[in-house]
Image (cartoon, helix red, strand yellow):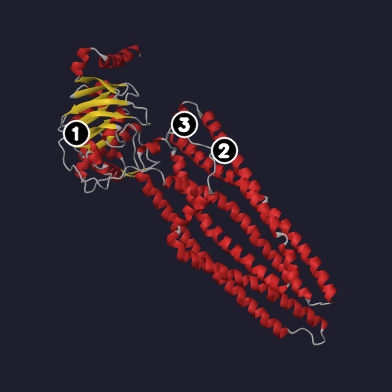
């Protein structure tokens, strides 16, 4: 499914990779939290140990009661009271250690998730533009939210459960063999069956958990796409198509999630069945031993073992639950680490060249470029632009106009050749330095939730209201802003009624506030009416005076006063000159210019 908002294709199914590799990466990431994690796990062990010892005390109470019923001296209530008090202390210690373990793990979990999100946030700013051109935005967001939350849930619950389960199994085995080796053998005989069944289920269900995470990212991408393009979908009556696409992805999620949850859900009844077999075995064998030995107090041992068997089934069940969660977690961790390990923009720490003030001379020298290796779309591009010139770039869709600007802004690196600003190669300048040299207005308007003042002064500090009012007047927004209830301090959000044209005017005003030495206007007037366009053109003439400006336009009437017009086709400059020269030549530009008026007359 092509993504209109984010671009690229989402891969719904992906072969699961090694859980060990993902677990190893996760362990390295959590290394800074090793000491508090050890403390938390020791607390979990301590709580479990007290929980293991307590059944022996209960068995002793049962034995004392049984023995007292058979004895003329009656039941020894004093000794029972002492044992009961020790049980209260044990259970109290168990609760304290459990609380400490939970508090520590919750703190570690939130800090680790916070660190994950910070790492992802920093990574986003280091990724090249081509990554987002080939990925769904929703899939990226899913890695930040769903996948990180899944990892956090596992850290908070499953890790301590696993340690508790291991401690419980080891401790119970020791206690059972100390109490009665015969009954211990009976209880343990069911363990291999449980382990084999769990391993079989885990090996089958792992791929479905991985698919579930991938499909979840895909459906997030689709939903983000639909919401951001809601008006277009309604206008073209594409609701059914979008619903069908959603249903298709949703069915895939249903299929993988159903299989994953069904298989993991089988673990609980299997473990319950195996545990019940243990109960039956202990009762039968224990009864036989009590009858053969004639030892009535052995009932206390059987009572203890009934608790042991119940406790013994808990860690096995926990293992099955942890195995279920761990599969989803490793799939989520794999997706997060895949993102964090994506190829970043080239390192610029060694670059020392810097342009603080420029005249605006720009030269493209034998520039070649392709988005995909081996597929060149800009071919041996050469042009020399003098400082202060207003340069219009025109041509049919796909000619390479926006690509040219992306190269100039260093959003992409040229495949070969070089771009020079005032004789300095762009490749020797940092991206931040290049971006500071240009003010940019894109065809796609972008405003964030905040006041008009904050949107206009984006990235700038110390801008006076007088400057802002002059910019608003130059763009024809002065009256609009004055009519708003709070003027410049009006918050722009989903509830603010603002047209697409006004949004574009605000982005143009933002570029004016930027006051950069060079300008790039990519279809900056595409969403405004003709009268407003004339006002903007006048403002742009004032704004671009003395500055090198690049203007991409489809409406050729807006760039007639450009100093030089570059006519592009198939990645090449086929014509260049001013409007009068190109019209007199009667070539491709003249055909483009006249065709607009021919279409207008036909309408």
Q: CA distance from mark 3 to mark 2?
A: 17 Å
Could you tell which of marks 2 and 1 lies nearer the N-terminus? 2
Give coordinates of residue 305: x percent, y percent.
73, 69
Give coordinates of residue 110: x percent, y percent.
46, 58
Crowd class of label 3 (few under 14; some 14 to 19; many from 20; radius 10 Å): some
Residue 36 drawn above or below residue 155: below
Q: Could you tell me which residue is drawn at 56 percent across and 67 percent down?
A: 44
* Secondary element at tag 3: loop
| Foreground: disc 2 or disc 1 | 2
Q: Quadrant of residue 346?
A: top left
Give coordinates of residue 55: x percent, y percent.
68, 72
Q: CA distance from mark 1 to mark 3?
A: 39 Å
Crowd class of label 1 (few under 14; some 14 to 19; many from 20; radius 10 Å): many
Residue 315 drawn above or below residue 15: below
Using the image as rendered, state which of residue 139 and residue 263 is in the foreground.
263
Q: Could you tell me which residue is drawn at 25 percent across and 40 percent down?
A: 435
Would residue 420 be found to the left or right of residue 375 on screen?
A: left
Could you tell which of marks 1 and 3 lies nearer the N-terminus? 3
Give coordinates of residue 480: x percent, y percent.
29, 36
Residue 264 shows in the view: no
- Of the numbered discs in the image, which one, if any, rests on residue 2? 3
Would residue 3 be found to the left or right of residue 348 on screen?
A: right
Crowd class of label 2 (few under 14; some 14 to 19; many from 20; radius 10 Å): some
Q: Are marks 3 and 2 in contact (CB under 8 Å)?
A: no
Q: Residue furthest bottom?
A: 73
* Secondary element at tag 1: helix
Q: Which residue is mark 1?
A: 543
């Amino acid at each position: 499914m092509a993504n209109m908002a984010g671009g690229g294709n989402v891969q719904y199914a992906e072969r699961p990779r090694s859980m060990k590799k993902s677990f190893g990466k996760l362990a390295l990431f959590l290394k800074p939290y090793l000491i508090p994690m050890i403390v938390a796990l020791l607390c979990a062990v301590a709580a479990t140990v007290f929980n293991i010892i307590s059944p022996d005390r209960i068995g002793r109470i049962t034995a004392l009661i049984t023995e007292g019923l058979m004895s003329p001296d009656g039941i020894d209530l004093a000794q029972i009271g002492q044992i009961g008090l020790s049980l209260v202390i044990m259970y109290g210690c168990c609760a304290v250690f459990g609380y400490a373990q939970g508090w520590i793990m919750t703190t570690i979990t939130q800090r680790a998730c916070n660190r994950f999100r910070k790492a992802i946030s920093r990574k986003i700013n280091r990724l090249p533009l081509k990554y987002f051109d080939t990925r769904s935005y929703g899939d990226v967001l899913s890695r930040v939210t769903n996948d990180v939350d899944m990892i956090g849930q596992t850290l908070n619950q499953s890790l301590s459960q696993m340690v508790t389960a291991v401690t419980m199994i080891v401790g119970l085995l020791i206690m059972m063999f100390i109490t009665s080796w015969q009954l211990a053998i009976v209880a343990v005989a069911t363990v291999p069956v449980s382990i084999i069944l769990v391993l079989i289920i885990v090996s089958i269900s792992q791929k479905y958990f991985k698919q579930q995470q991938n499909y979840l990212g895909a459906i997030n991408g689709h939903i983000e796409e639909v919401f951001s393009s809601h008006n277009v979908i309604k206008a073209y009556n594409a609701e059914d198509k979008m619903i069908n696409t959603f249903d298709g992805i949703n069915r895939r999620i249903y299929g993988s999630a159903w299989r994953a949850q069904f298989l993991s859900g089988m673990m609980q009844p299997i473990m319950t069945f195996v545990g019940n077999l243990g109960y039956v075995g202990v009762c039968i064998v224990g009864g036989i031993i009590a009858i053969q030995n004639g030892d009535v107090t052995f009932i206390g041992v059987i009572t203890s073992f009934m608790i042991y068997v119940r406790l013994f089934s808990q860690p096995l069940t926990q293992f099955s639950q942890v195995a279920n969660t761990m599969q989803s977690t490793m799939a989520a961790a794999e997706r997060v680490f895949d993102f964090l390990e994506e190829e970043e923009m080239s390192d610029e720490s060694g670059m020392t060249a810097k342009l603080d003030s420029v005249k605006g001379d720009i030269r493209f020298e034998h520039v070649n470029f392709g988005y995909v290796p081996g597929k060149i779309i800009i071919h041996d591009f050469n042009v020399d632009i003098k400082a202060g010139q207003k340069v219009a770039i025109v041509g049919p869709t796909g000619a390479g106009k926006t690509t040219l600007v992306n190269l100039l802004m260093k959003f992409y690196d040229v495949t070969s050749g070089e771009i020079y600003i005032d004789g300095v190669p762009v490749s020797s300048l940092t991206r931040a330095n290049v971006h500071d040299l240009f003010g940019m207005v894109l065809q796609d308007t972008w405003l964030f939730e905040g006041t008009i003042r904050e949107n206009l002064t984006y990235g700038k500090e110390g801008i006076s209201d007088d400057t802002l009012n002059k910019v608003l007047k130059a763009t024809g927004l002065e009256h609009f802003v004055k009519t708003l209830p709070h003027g410049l301090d009006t918050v722009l959000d989903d509830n603010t009624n603002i047209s697409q044209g006004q949004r574009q005017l605000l982005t143009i005003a933002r570029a004016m506030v930027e006051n950069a030495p060079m300008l790039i206007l990519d279809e900056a007037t595409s969403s405004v009416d003709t009268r407003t366009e004339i006002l903007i053109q006048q403002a742009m003439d004032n704004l671009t005076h003395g500055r090198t400006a690049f203007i991409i336009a489809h409406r050729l009437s807006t760039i007639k006063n450009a100093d030089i017009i570059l006519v592009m086709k198939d990645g090449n400059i086929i014509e260049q000159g001013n409007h009068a020269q190109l019209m007199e030549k009667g070539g491709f530009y003249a055909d483009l210019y006249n065709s607009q008026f021919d279409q207008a007359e036909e309408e």
